Amino acid sequence: MTAITNHMPTAELQALDAAHHMHPFTENGALAEKGARVITRAKGVYLTDSEGAEILDAMAGLWCVNIGYGRDELAEAAARQIRELPYYNTFFQTTHVPVIALSAKLAELAPGDLNHVFFASGGSDANDTNIRMVRTYWAEKGKPDKKVIISRHNAYHGSSVGSASLGGMSGMHAQGGIPIPDIHHINQPDWWSEGGNMTPEDFGLARARELEEAILELGEDRVAAFIAEPVQGAGGVIVAPDTYWPEIQRICDKYEILLIADEVICGFGRTGNWFGSETLRIRPHIMTVAKGMSSGYQPIGASIVCDEVAAVIGACEFNHGYTYSGHPVASAVALENLRILQEERVIEHVRDVAAPYLKQQLETLSDHPLVGEVKIVGMMGSIALTPHKDTRAKFASEAGTAGLICRERCFANNLIMRHVGDRMVVSPPLVITPDEIDILINRARKSLDECHATLKERDLMRAAS
Ligand SMILES: Cc1ncc(COP(=O)(O)O)c(C=O)c1O
């Protein structure tokens, strides 16, 4: 077989891809007909495809490339570590320098007494660790029945059997025999779509109190933990009303429920602080991290655990771990990424420059006839598409029809934005500049205009009754 390189014609690469590569979350048969877009390189906030188009990546890959593409320092860190110690495990009373350094660094950055780190290869398996860890914690404390984990509908916590069970994606639960037992879901705090005539404040309280109702219904002695993303990402950048999180914190405190903050997207600057828990003022016992920890340059995830839980887990043999837990190369790259985030003051750039400007510019889209709510926290934002903004109406067409058309227009205009149902989502690299934000917004507006024209043409601007 000849070498497959960046220089092959796009059609040949697409044909090979279609023949042998099964894409995640994709109808592969349909994609094979169309051909996948082939990305060949990237720098800063731009991707280049095999046709030479420069695409502004307003999703930072999958919400992960926080420092932007093409940083040589991370390539050097990986090369150095591969030469020195490409792999060793941390199972049998051994450790190595990159994992020691990264653990200490994460303990320093994480709020409160989150001082202990259990590594994984990504967010899904870190959440699997959490399921087993919180249940083991309560069992070790003599409460083996305390094993129900409460989560939320439309949450995303990963794609493994455990983490997808925690998640509340109905499409995922429809396949493969999940959820596993003892996971319970309550409703999400999505005021725009589900708030009806309530004020956002009352709605936020009502949705938080569903946690209390669930605990009382299931029995306090059966509930181990509540897990939630500080801001729901894959669910469509759902920002809870201000009343929600203080009430959730009160309930977790009152009933001694462990709080797990899934920071896989929110962590490492995305919300304008190191962690979303700081932005939303919550005090988790465990934080799930991944993505921005290495800016996606290496696959790595972790559970960052508080002193009390770590002490209880540390007093037993926790029969859990992954071959690549604390992988030396991934750890070295993550450390270098954290150094850059810190020394280049990327979180300050988000707070003082990029996030305020992105908010201001994204909000200029509110005057567009297709745009309902614009929501943004730090560098994660969403735009709800609607056929009738005054009534927060949904489209009569199947959910996601308008969103998909809009995403396709974005793609054609060399802008990566994702659609979640009929919401458009942005989550660009944190290092994006105001000039690049202008380009992002211009392309988004053009795509919205084109989407609007198509919807009108196809008589799809009708509201659901
Ligand atoms: C909040 C959250 N948790 C967990 C995951 C799963 O992470 P991974 O895809 O690295 O397994 C994701 C991925 O998008 C996520 O957004």
Image (cartoon, rainbow, N blue to C red):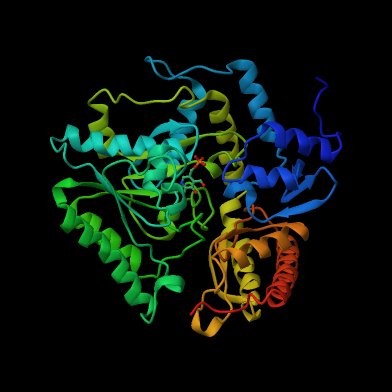
* Left or right for 169, reference 399: left
The residue shown at (41%, 15%) is 94
Residue 123 appears at what percent x and percent y? 47, 40
The residue shown at (55%, 44%) is 292
Q: Residue 363 sits in which quadrant? A: bottom right
Q: Nearer the viewer, residue 380 or 456?
A: 456
Quadrant location of the N terminus?
top right
Residue 203 appears at what percent x and percent y? 34, 73
Q: Residue 448, relative to residue 231: is it above or below?
A: below
The residue shown at (54%, 18%) is 87
Q: Is residue 169 visible?
A: no
Q: Residue 9 sits in which quadrant? A: top right
Total numbered circles: 0
Residue 289 appears at what percent x and percent y? 46, 42
Q: Nearer the viewer, residue 342 or 203?
A: 203
Q: Is residue 422 visible?
A: yes
* Left or right for 50, reference 419: right
Residue 320 appears at what percent x and percent y? 35, 26
